[in-house]
Amino acid sequence: MVFSSKLIEDAVQELSRLQGIGKKTALRMVLQLMKMEKEQVDGFTSAISRMRHELRFCDECFNVSDAALCAICSNRARNHTQLCLVENIRDVIAIESTQQYNGLYHVLGGILSPLDGIGPEHLNITSLHKRVTDKQIEEVIMALSPTIEGDTTVYYIARQLKDLPVHITTIARGIAFGGELEYADEMTLARSIAKRLPIENYVHVHGKNAI
Amino acid sequence: MVFSSKLIEDAVQELSRLQGIGKKTALRMVLQLMKMEKEQVDGFTSAISRMRHELRFCDECFNVSDAALCAICSNRARNHTQLCLVENIRDVIAIESTQQYNGLYHVLGGILSPLDGIGPEHLNITSLHKRVTDKQIEEVIMALSPTIEGDTTVYYIARQLKDLPVHITTIARGIAFGGELEYADEMTLARSIAKRLPIENYVHVHGKNAI
């Protein structure tokens, strides 16, 4: 693309650094920003700038945070004896958005993946062990992706914690709501039959208080 | 979506102002920006900010510009007797990207649309008339979209300029390169038969010097 303005070219160049944004989409964004009020654009850029410069990680759970302790860890109304172990902050947002979980989180910062050179020392596992010991955690819920690496990580961490007086659970696997039985993969279907639930649980899950 | 950080929430909020960007896409962008170096993010925000604050419009052709006269109008190597009339700066970028046009532009800033309340007084038509008169323009190429409004605008402007010693042309309509005949609409197909070209032109157009 040939731009007759260096200012537009630079802005398009910067916006197209973002994943999934090509030159044409970036140009459309630039033209939209061009038409916005100057104050609005200032708000736009300063929100991004402040996010990058002021954002930090929670000292306790490694979730993103505006202060030393994140809004979840510092919330006294939440259950401080329950930890939900997740891979990254996107999973925290996903689980928080269900509004069904009232405990705390622990963000691993990845999952074990020897092929990518990610070993236990790269993840927040030591801090998890310390936290479970020091804070009298009663339950650790493993909410990792059901992949080979995810399962390996669950297994590894479960072994690390096995001498501590903590209850370890994993999130339920099975057929998703709205999913069609015939399109489910064999492993999921087999497991969802093996781990079938009494009908009372079914009613319970469909009600409001799932957790 | 529930974010545990106000900084992230604000950044997602601002990014999702952009057309075609939902909350999930905005969050993915924020997570990417979060991982970028601070200097890179500063470059990102300052390019957008400078674009909005420093960008102006060319005094001659109303194209976006970094100075009083845009890079095209101030280029002495271009043909200053030819004007290409376009609706907006996006069309300038599209035509410039073909690298086949060597004249100047005149950006109308819209097309006539009585239903949307856009009349001749809202477009850069008076300035076009003055420019054609003062600058001894020899040809005005109408490059507007082939819609009812576009054709109305072409007709209106052609009438405004009819007393001036200027040659008025419109861009060719017809079957697009790579287009399948059977899928072309009837009007386009009928017109491309009525306005058929001698075979010499065909060879010429397929060569390098189309304009």
Image: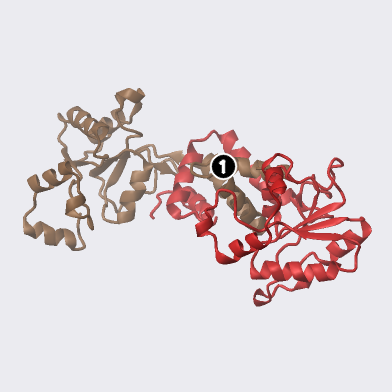
Chain colours: A red, B brown
* Residue carrying label 1: B16
In the picture, measured across the screen, residue A145 lies left or right of residue B184, that is right
Determine the residue positioned at 68% across, 66% down.
Answer: A150
Quarter of the N terminus of chain A within the rendering: bottom left
Report the front residue among A116 and B41. A116
Query: Which chain hosts label 1?
Result: B
Q: Is A127 above or below relative to B47?
A: below
Residue B142 appears left or right of A45: left
Q: Position of residue A152 (x, y in %)?
A: 71, 71
The residue positioned 69% from the left and 45% from the top of the image is A205
Placement of A99 over or under A170, stated as above or below:
above
Which residue shows up at 56% across the image and 35% down it?
Answer: A38
Name the amino acid, label 1: Ser
Q: Is residue A75 visible?
A: yes
Q: Residue furthest front?
A: A199
Quick one: label 1, few (<14), some, or many (20+) residues within 10 Å?
A: some
Q: Residue B147: name its quadrant.
A: top left
Name, please, the residue furthest toward the left. Answer: B198
Q: Is residue B81 left or right of residue A126?
A: left
Q: How far from the left and from the top, in percent, is residue B174?
A: 17, 48
* Foreground pick, B117 / B24: B24
x, y (%) of residue A133? 92, 61
In this view, the residue in front, A141 or A21, is A141
Tell me: B210 left or right of B54: left
Element carrying mark 1: loop
